[in-house]
Amino acid sequence: MHRTIVNVILLVGLLFSLLVLASGMSAWRLPDNQQGYSPEQPIAYSHRLHAGELGIDCQFCHTAASHGRHAGIPSSDVCMKCHKFVTSSFDVLQEEIALADKEKRKPKTIVSDELRKLYDTLGLNDPQQLIEEGAASSVPWVRVHNLPDYVSFDHRAHIAAGVTCQKCHGPVESMERMRQYESLSMGWCVNCHREATADGVNGRAVHASTDCAVCHY
Amino acid sequence: MSQIFRQSDSPNSADRDGTPLAEDVDPHGSEPLAISRRRFLEAAGFTFTMTALNGCSRTPVETALPFAAQPEGMIPGRSLAYASTCAGCPAGCGLLASVRDGRPLKMEGLPGHPLSRGGLCAVGQALPLGLYDSHRLQHPLRVGKPVSWDEVDQAMPSLLKAVNDKGGAVRFVTSTITSPTLQATIDAFLEQFEYARHITFDAASCSAILDAHEQTHGDRVLPRYQLDQADVIVSCGADFLGTWISPVEFTTAWRSRRVPTVEQPEMSYHVQLEGRLSLTGSNADRRLRLSPEEYGVVLSRLFVLLGERAGEVTAGDGPQSLPIAEEELAALADRLWAARGRSVVLSDSQDVSVQVLVNGINHRLGNYGSTLDIVHPSRQRQGNDREVLALVDELKAGKVAALFVVGTDLTHNLPDRETLIEAIGKVGLVVSFSERLDDVTSVAQFACPDHHPLESWLDAEPVDGIVSLSQPLLAPLGETRSILESLARWSGRNESAYDILRAHWEQKILPRAETRPFVDFWDRAVHDGFVEVAPTAKPVGEFRSDSVKLITHEETNELSLTLYSKVGLPDSRHAHNPWLQELPDPITKVTWDNYVCVSPALAEEQGLSEGDVVRIALVEGNVELELPVVLQPGQHDRMLAIALGYGVKGTDRFAHIGPQWLEARPTVAPGELVGKNAAPFIKPSEGTLRYVRGDVTLTRTDRQRELASTQEHHRLEVPPNVAPYGAELREPIQTTSLPAFAADPGSGAPEVHGDLDVQLWPEDHPKTGHWWGMAIDLNACTGCSACVIACQSENNVPVVGKDEVRRQREMHWIRLDRYYVGEGDDVDVLHQPMMCQHCDNAPCETVCPVLATAHSEEGLNEQAYNRCVGTRYCANNCPYKVRRFNWFEYPHKDPLQNLALNPDVTVRSRGVMEKCSMCVQRIEEGKIEAKRLGEPLGDGQVQTACQQSCPAQAIVFGDMNDPSSAISVALENPRRYGVLEEFNFRPSVSYLRVVRNREEQDEKLMHDGENGDENDGENGGGHV
C-alpha cells in the first residue's frame, strides 16, 4: 500500500516535471529568434485601440513605409495631431464634460498617466502649448523588430508589391502591446518569396527574387 | 590570459601568426599549471553550457528614437542630395553630397557643372572623413586655452584697435580664395586698419604663370585653359591630369578629345616633356624625358622654330645645344603650327622667364582667345610668391604687428620653418583660423577654428562668370564658427554667415544675372549649386612681344631635386585623412609615405636599390632629409623627386591605425610623422618659390626602410603552362595606335584560336530580367584613382595601416593596375582599374564549400558575408585577384569616423571574404524605387560609385539586356575586349582598348619592347 502511494507520487512528480519541461521547451528558440518578443514600452501605447478599435490606417503614422527603407516609428508630433485635444480616454473626457455641464463650469483638462509621459518628453505642461525647439526630446521606444546588421529589408518593395502589413507583423490591430509575430528568420523570408513568385501576391503576379544579394550586401 | 599566449622564439615555429598554443607550457620547462584534467573538463563544460544558454537569450534591448518633430521632407533611411562646392582645393568642382539621416556620407560629382562636368577627384571624395575627425579643433583657444566665442569677441576689438593706433602692419595670409563673399568680407575687415595687406599663399604655387602674364599682358592673371579646344597639347612638366591647378576640369576636357570613334577616328595629340614620371606623362601620346632645368632652352628653341614658321623674326639667338633631338622638336613645332589656335602649351615651371616663353609660344600660335582665356580668367590659383617672401622678411625683421592666417599651413609649406615659427611667435597678435593645431595655431594668441567646408555657407567663383554655392550639410560638430561671421563680428557687424552671403549675392552677384527677383535667383542657385552669370571681363593688355627673352643656356646641375605634389595628397591640409594616406600613388603605388624617386640608371650608378634610405642635403646650408628610395623608370637620370605635403604635425596619430596584433608594426615609428616634410628644400629665387633646385647631394646610408607599396600585390600573371588549349595568353591591356585604329577599328586585338564558346556547364543562369555589366574605356581612364576613394566611401572599405599594406592586406575593392611597357627608361605606362569582373563562369563560385559566393539571376557574383567561413579558396581561385579577406576587425581608431559609414552596406567582420559588389545596394535601391513609382528602371538611373565620380567618364554601367542602354552601345565598340577572356570566364566587365595617337612605327617599337620583356603582363611591372 505504502509502496503504491510512493509510486503514484513519484509517477505524478515525473509527469509533472515532464510537463514543465515540455512547456519550457516549446518556448525555446534558436539563438537570435525573437519571435514573440513583446517588451514593455515607455508609454503603454495600444495598437489594438488605435489600429483596431479606431481603425487608423497603419501608414497614417508609419508614413515612411511606402517611401523608404524603414517604416519608421512616428515622431511625437504625429501623436500630437490628435493628442493635442484628446488628452485622456473618451469615457473619462465625456464624464468630465458631463460633470462640468452639471456644475456649470468649464471642463478641466484631464490628462491620462500615459499621455502625461508623452507631454513630458515634449516639454509641454499644457497639451495645447506649442512645442518648443530644444525642450522636446524623443520617446525612447524599445525596438521590437530588429534584423541582424547583414540583412537589408526595404518596406517600399513589399508595399509596392501589395504585401499587407499583417503578413509579416501579424494582427497588430488586436495587440494591446506590440509583439514580434513572425520569426523573421531567413527561412521564413525565403519561403514567402518562393510562394509569392509561384502564386503571386493577392492575385498579382510578382517576381520575388531569392538571390543572396537581394537582402545581403 | 596572457600566460597562455606565447610569442614565437624560433622563426620556424608553427605559431608564428600568434595562434594560442594548445598547452600551457612554461617556456623554462617547469611544471604545467596546477589544474586537474577533471577540473578542466568541469570548467569547460560549464563554460560551454553557459555560452549555449546565453545564445538563447534575447538580444540586448535597443531603443529606437524617432524625432520629436520630424523635419519636413525628411524620410528616415533615405538619402537627400544637396548641390554644393568642393573645398578640397581651390579648383571649385561641383559637389553633390548625399546626406542620410542628417549625416553627409558620400560626395559625388555634380552633374552638369560647367567645370567638373560631374567628376570629382579622390580628395573631394574623401571630404567626409575629414569632417568626422575628432582631432579638428572643437572650440576657440586663447593662448592654447579653450575659451568661448564671447570672450574672443570681447577681447578682439581692443586688441585690433591697439594695433591700429600704433600704426602696426596687419598681414592677412590666406590660401587662394575663390569666394567673392569671403574676399569682400576680408577687404571690409582690413579697411579698418591703416597698414593692412592681404597676402595669398599657395602651398602648390603657380605664381610664375601669373607673374609672366603681368609681364606679357600687363595683367596678373591665370588663364583659363580650355583643353577641350586643343588638338595639340604640349605640357612641360604640368601634371594637369593629376595635381596641377584644376585636375578634374582638365581631365574631363582632355578626355573629351581622347576617344576616337569608328566614324571619327580623331583624337588630340598630347606631348609631355617632363623629368619625373607624372600621371599626365603616363597618359601622353609622346613623352620626352627632360630635366626641369632644361625646359627653358627647349621652349626657347620651340619659340624660334615657331617664329620661322610664322615668318616672324625672333630677337636674339636660340640655344646652341639641345637636350632633345632637333628633329623631334621640329616635328613638334610643325604639329603645333598646323594646329595654331587649336593647341596649347603648358608648363609648371616656377621660373618666370620660362613662363614668359610659354606665353610667347601660345601667342605665336594664336592660342589666346581660344584655348587660353585671359579675358575670363581662372581664379583657381592666385598665390603671389613675391608678397609671401616679403612677408617672411617682414616677419623675421619683426615688422608685423598682427598676423591672420586662413586655410593654409604657412610654416609647413615654407622653407626655414623653425626661424619662421620663432618670428611668428614674436608677432604681437596672431590669429589662426585653422581647423587643426598646426604650427601657427600653436603659437597664436587666438585660434578661431573655421567650420569644416561641409558645415558652412560659402561661395566660390573659380572661373570668372561661374559662381557656385557651398551649403552646410549638417550642424557644426564642434564649437567652430564661420570665418565670415568672425570677421564680420570684428568689423562691428553682427551677422550670420548665411546673411552675409545672401546680402553679398543680392548686391554683387544678382546684377550680373538675368533672373529676377532675388529669391528665385537664390533658390535656383541653392538648388543647382552654381549659376552662370555675366563675367566681370575687363580688357586685357596687348601682348608685349618685347617681353619674351630667349633662354640660350640654363645652368644644369649634376643632380637636381624636384618637389611635387602627390595625386592623393595635393596639400598638407589633407594629411590627416587616412583614406588619402592609404591611397596608392597612381605611378609608384606606394602608400603612407613619401620617398625619393630616382631613375634606375642613377640608382645603379649610386648602388641603390628600392627601399634604401638616402640622405638628401643641400650643398650649402643645413637642410637635410633622410628618405627611402623608389626606383622610377621614365624619370630623368639627373634628378630626384620628393613629394611635398608629408611630415605634417599631428600625423603621429596614425601610429596605431589598423589592427594591433602580435606582430603589428606601427604605421608611424615613435617620434616620427607620416613621411617627411620636403618644404625646407623649396628655394626662393627671383620672387617665386622654386620647386626645382640644383645644389643637392645624395648620400647612401646603410639603412633600409620597407615601403608599403601595392605594386607587386594581386598580380594577374598567368603561368604559360595553364594556358587553355588552342588559345594564347593575351595581354591584360590591349593597345593600338590611332592610324591603325583608323584603318581597322578592331586593330590591336589578338588573333583568336579555338572556340571560346565551349561550355562545360549548361547555361544555368538565364538572366531574363536585368543583366548588369560594366565597360571601362582605358583610353579615357587616366589612373587618377578617384574611383578607389569613391568605392571606399560607398562600401565601408576599411583602412588597414602601413604594416598591413606591406603584408598585401589592403582592402580596396577597386585597384588601379599600372603596367610599364617597354624596356629601358623610356617606358610606356598603362593604367587599368581592376575590380570583381562578375564572371559568368566564375572560378570563385565553384570552389566555395559553403556557397557563400553565388551567381545571381542578374549576372552578379554575390558574396554573402554571413555565410562565409573564410576558407579563402575563392581568393586563391580568382584569376583577377580582386577578393579581399578580413584578417581582422577594422574598427575606426577615431570613433567619430564611424559616422562616415554607409548604413546601406554591411560592415564586414573578421574572417570573411569581400569584394566589389557592383554597388548592389545602389542596384537594389534603384530597382525598388522604380517599383515604388511603378516605372521601369531607366538606363543610367543606377550608377556605381566608381562610375559616378570618374572625372574621365571612363566607366559605363548598365543593363546588358537593354539593347539601347549605354553599356550595350559600349559593348558594340570594336575596341572592346575582356581581360583573360581566353579562359572563358565570361567576365561582365569589359574594357575598351587603349589608342595612342602615334605612328605605327612607334607602336611597333612599343610592341617589340613588350615581347622582349619577360615580366610584361604582370601587375606593376616587377622588372624595375
Image (cartoon, rainbow, N blue to C red):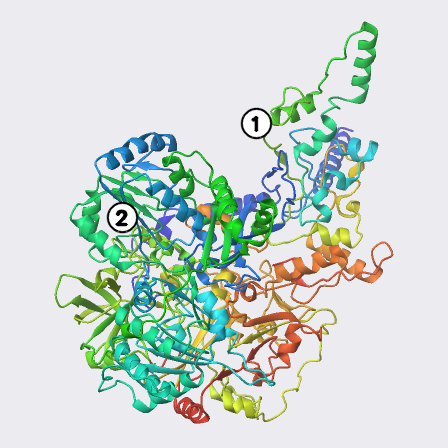
In this rendering, the answer to whether B227 lies above or below B269 is above
Residue visible at 66% across and 83% down in the picture: B760
Residue at label 1? A135
Residue B884 is left or right of residue A61, and the answer is left
Res B812 visible: no
> Mark 2 near mark 1, Cβ–Cβ under 8 Å?
no
In this rendering, the answer to whether B41 lies above or below B783 is above
Secondary element under disc 2, as helix, strand or loop, is helix
Residue at label 2? B439
Residue visible at 73% across and 33% down in the picture: A177
Residue B600 is left or right of residue B957, and the answer is left
Rendering coords of residue A127 (x, y %)? 68, 22
Q: Which of the chains bears the disc numbered 1?
A: A
Q: Quadrant of the C terminus of chain A?
A: bottom right
B423 or B227: nearer the eye? B227
Rendering coords of residue B562 (x, y %)? 27, 70
Would you call the spot at circle 1 few (<14 residues within 10 Å), some (14-19), or many (20 or more)? few
Q: Identity of the amino acid at label 2?
A: Asp
Secondary element under disc 1, as helix, strand or loop, is loop
Q: Which of the chains bears the disc numbered 2?
A: B
Res B268 visible: yes
Q: Quadrant of residue B906?
A: bottom right
Q: Identity of the amino acid at label 1?
A: Ala
Rendering coords of residue B5 (x, y %)? 37, 54
Would you call the spot at circle 2 few (<14 residues within 10 Å), some (14-19), or many (20 or more)? many
